Amino acid sequence: MTAETSQTLDRGLRVLKLLADTDHGLTVTELSNKLGVNRTVVYRLLATLEQHALVRRDIGGRARVGLGVLRLGRQVHPLVREAALPALRSLAEDLGATAHLTLVDGTEALAVAVVEPTWTDYHVAYRAGFRHPLDRGAAGRAILAARQGCTEGDGLALTHGELEAGASGAAAPLLGVSGIEGSVGVVLLADVVPERVGARVVEAAKEVAEALR
C-alpha cells in the first residue's frame, strides 16, 4: 500500500531541488514547465517558500534558493559528523595521523569533524571549524576533482606544505552521496605521503560515504 503523501509539500520540495540545481535561478514559467503545473500553483508555492526564507526572487523575477536553507544546512553538520566518526577514528588510529571530514561551505572547505590519534608522540594539530580555499590543501582539491568528474584513483589528492609548513595531506572525495560535497583525509608530518596512506584514506572515504547514504 502506498503511503498517503502531500502533493503540495512534494511540489514545494521539487521547487527547492530544481532551484538548488541551477546557478542562475528559474522563472515562474520555467518552474511551471518543469513541474508540469500552471503558473498560479507556482506563484503560491514560491510565496509560501519566501515566507520561510527558503526562496528569494531577484529584481528580474528569477527565483533562487534563499538564506533560510543555510540555517537548515547548519543542522546537518552534526548528523554528518556523527555518521563519519567511527571511520575517522579507525583511520586516525591506523595511520597515526590526524583524520578529518571536510565539507563545502560556500567557496571554502570547512572541517566539520577531526579525530587525532591516541598513541603517537606528536601529530599535526587540526581543529574542527578550520576553513581554507577549495583550491588549497588536499581536502579541497579532492572535492574539486570530484566536482569536475575526475575520479581516477578514486579522486585521491596529495599535497605538501600548502596549508602548514612541513605537513602533507591526503584526501579522497565522498562519492555517490546525494546533496553532500565533501572529503575524508589525513594530515601528517612527512615530506612524502606513503602509498599505504593514500589507499587507506580512499577506503575511509568509501566507508563514510556508505554511512551517509
Image (spheres, rainbow, N blue to C red):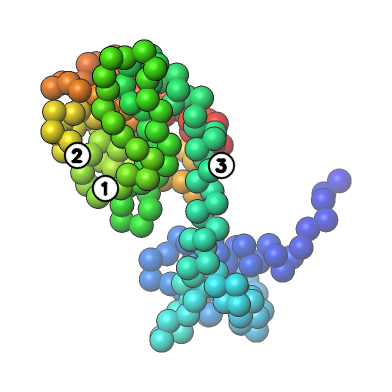
Q: Are marks 1 and 3 in contact (CB under 8 Å)?
A: no
Residue 83 image offset from top left, x and y in percent: 54, 33
Q: Which residue position holds label 3?
A: 79
Q: Residue at x 13, y 28 (%)?
A: 166
- In the displayed structure image, the side of residue 104 where residue 211 appears, left or right: right
Residue 176 image offset from top left, x and y in percent: 47, 38
The amino acid sitting under disc 1 is: His
Q: Is residue 121 above or below residue 205?
A: above
Q: Residue at x 46, y 46 (%)?
A: 180
Question: Circle 2 sits in a helix, a strand or a loop, which is it?
Answer: loop
Picture quarter containing residue 82?
top right
Q: Residue at x 26, y 47 (%)?
A: 132
User: Is residue 5 or residue 143 the one in the foreground?
Assistant: 143
Mark 1 is surrounded, within 10 Å at the Cα level, by few (under 14), some (14 to 19) or many (20 or more) other residues, namely some
The amino acid sitting under disc 3 is: Leu
Q: Which residue position holds label 2?
A: 163
Residue 74 image offset from top left, x and y in percent: 50, 53
- In the displayed structure image, the side of residue 30 where residue 152 appears, left or right: left
Q: Is residue 2 above or below residue 155?
A: below
Q: Residue at x 52, y 67 (%)?
A: 68
Q: Which residue position holds label 1?
A: 132
